[in-house]
Image: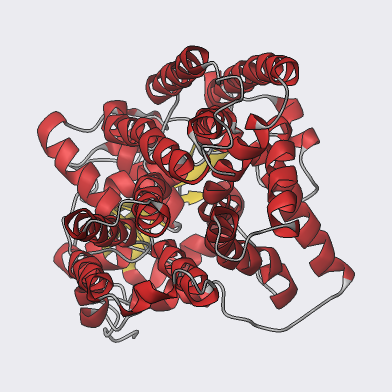
Amino acid sequence: MSSGAQAGRRPAPAGLILAFVAACAILRGLAMIATGFKGDEAYTLVISRMLALSYFDHPPLHQWLVHGFVAQFGESRWVRAPFWAIVLATNIPMFGLTRCLFGRNAAYWALFAFNAATYILVLPDGFIVPDIPLQLFALSAAWAMAEIVFARDDGAGRTMALWLAVGVALGLAGLSKYAAAFVPVGFLGFLLGSPRHRRWLWDPRAYVAALVALAIFSPAIVWNHQNGWLSFAFQTSRAAPQRFSFDGTALERLLRDLGTQIAMLSPWVGAPMALALAQAVRNPQADGAERFLLWLIAPPLALFVLMPLFGHGVLPHWFASAWLFAFPLAGEWLSEKSANWLRIWGRWTAALTAATAIAVMLAMNLGISWLMALLPPGARDPVEFAYDWPDLSHTSAWAELGAPPPAFVVADNWRYGGKLGQALGPNIPVCALSFDPREFAFTCDTAKWIGKDAAIVVLKRDADVRLKALAPYFRQIDQGHEFTVGRVGRAELTFVAARGRALTRPYAFPYGPYSDRASN
């Protein structure tokens, strides 16, 4: 619906909504300081110590941000501050996109829904993740696109500036996460299906924008070219079909994933969003705003919903690139409701949002045993790694390794390697020697430690198997010593730390620059 059609409605309570946005920012700020690094955050902090054109898991933007911030301010929880600011800044393109498409009232309600969504509020995967800059720049690109195709002012100078904004935003979104590709794909689909807007396909300024985006994204392209397209292959393999299955297991996984999405959006936001999405699907104008947003939502949503049928699991945050563009639809749907309905819904939503944020922060800091009882069977504890591990070098297990101190630390898992590396600090090298080392395959040249001792840290339940697998690389491995990590003194995970004496040969990683070493 156009902004003109909304002119006669009661204005949204802008002051209250902006106050709610500010309150959510404060809650996230408290979480930034009061909660420990999650697994992905600790891993990113460690691998970002080495500056590179790009990285194995993702394009480089969030690692560059971490590297630059740490260089100025050191490693602490404050390294999350740029990402906290990016989440806050994301409200600007969310408001701008929604106002361009549906008017000011809808834009304010889109802001309210966006900040009330559980995933955006509590950031269960942490602050230092590529999804946060992706959201800012993907929305910014979509906003500029909407201004081009829907705004009445088609001045040549203004349109050229908007196309350049599209290129810069898409380039930065691509540098954040490969899922940024869904935005130009959706935009192209919209233009092809909209006779009124198809003319933009022949506008040379669109191709200038594409060149700008590619130029900004080029570090990731160069890195992949230098490394056998490993990062592209890794990410696309996670979605490549394996075998189609419409059996009970696949359907159960599909329904469980959808249920997780409702929880991540929070039911009090997810329900209006689902109704808004259904309304847009039922009656979209061929070349209207609803169709524009549906094209941005549909490709990633369809891919991730259907992945369980093709033998793949889906990580909950993958859906964020789709739901991001449903918030403007939710804002429009909410703006059509009566003032009394919105007053009741708004109050309950604000209260439930605050309660959710407090409950999650308590779970991250204290652990809540009943949390797992609420999750489906087989689900991973969402706050399993949401606490800082102690500095191993200051524990009795480290002292029992003997003198002199080991030259480096070996983990058999990239997540544990990240947590250990963050806890030990930048002065003690940490490597993940396993079949899935991720970026450690690029940062760990074990050849320089030939003849040196290592502290080998493995989970207790896997200790016999893991230490046996690493034994051929050391002259001998001493008996291990146990230590535990957990919240408020509890033993949530038990590890074994053993001294590996005299590394005898470099480790042959399964990929990366150190993968071509002899295995015997």
Using the rendered view, name the quadrant where residue 234 is placed.
Answer: bottom left
Q: Is residue 474 left or right of residue 251?
A: left
Residue 496 placed where, x, y %?
Answer: 48, 45
Q: Residue at x 33, y 36 (%)?
A: 86
Q: Is residue 415 left or right of residue 333?
A: left
Residue 408 shows up from this direction:
no
Q: Residue furthest left?
A: 72
Name which residue lies at 66% across and 59% down: 284
Residue at the image position 43 percent from the left and 44 percent from the top: 100
Q: How many marks?
A: 0
Asked whether 286 or 64 is in front, the reply is 286
Question: On screen, 430 above or below 185?
Answer: above
In the rendered structure, the answer to whether residue 430 lies left or right of residue 132 reads left
Q: Is residue 138 left or right of residue 336?
A: left
Colour convention? secondary structure
Residue 148: quadrant of the picture: bottom left
> Residue 173: image x %, image y %?
33, 57
- Position of 518 relative to 104 (above/below): below
From the top left corner, tell me how far across and down residue 306 is, in percent.
Answer: 70, 69
Residue 503 visible, this angle: yes
Q: Residue furthest right?
A: 248
Q: Position of residue 45 (x, y in %)?
A: 29, 44
Between 16 and 68, the residue placed more toward the observer is: 16
Say which quadrant the N terminus sits in.
top right
Quarter occupied by the C terminus: bottom left
